[in-house]
Image (cartoon, rainbow, N blue to C red):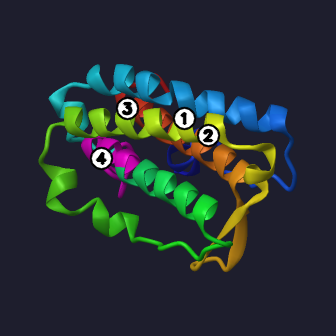
Amino acid sequence: MEKLKYPIGKFEMPLDFDRKMVQSWIDEIKTFPSRFRMVAQSLSDEQLATPYRPDGWTGQQVIHHVADSHMNAFIRFKWTLTEDSPTIKAYYEDRWAELADSLYPPISISLNILESVHYRWIVLLDAMEESDFRKYYIHPEYGKEYPLGAVCKLYAWHGNHHLAHLRILKGEI
């Protein structure tokens, strides 16, 4: 069950990072929407309606969740770059996944959102100074600081994590 839940392993927050590491994570974020779209669009209607594990989300919910999550990430970057160590707004992703906009719209809607958000996010990331990646937000649920450089790793992992869930549905993993 653990392998189905975390097919690429659990996320590990880096204790430190340098610009080269951050750039590799940004490169993952940059290429993610096209990699995700390719796998998502190859899923059948039956696969989209199937949970990737017992008590897991359907393929469709995973796709809509990724758009929700990455929109939140982009906004968190903007808050952190324009405010002094903000406490971000957490959200109940499991509850969001049960709302109508995660259950009914075609996946193309969220795939388009993802591409657009990532386009703007990459423009922002590419314009950031090295010192900007040391700026951090505070997550209220965990009460700890998240430097933006480490958050790049988090979202590179997050995308690949859910891409693996879709590959489980395809029988590739």
Q: Residues within 10 Å of mark 4 (few under 14, many from 20)?
A: many
Q: Secondary structure at mark 2?
A: helix
Position in image of residue 69 (x %, y %) = 43, 53
Any mark on residue 115, and which? Answer: 3
CA distance for labels 4 and 2: 23 Å
From the viewer's side, name the closer residue of 89 and 131: 131
Q: Which residues are magenta?
A: 52-67
Residue under the point 45% across and 48% down: 70
Q: Secondary structure at mark 4?
A: helix
First in sequence, mark 4 or 1: give its number. Answer: 4
Residue under the point 40% across and 41% down: 117
**Disc 1 and disc 2 in contact, CB within 8 angstroms:** yes
Q: Relative to 88, does residue 82 appear above or below in the rendering? A: above
Identify which amino acid the numbered label 4 is placed on.
His
4 or 2: mark nearer the eye: 2
Q: Is residue 148 magenta?
A: no
Any mark on residue 125, and which? Answer: 2
Residue 44 placement, left or right of 168:
left
The residue to which callout 1 is attached is 122
The residue to which callout 4 is attached is 64
Q: Residues within 10 Å of mark 1 (few under 14, many from 20)?
A: some
First in sequence, mark 1 or 3: give its number. Answer: 3
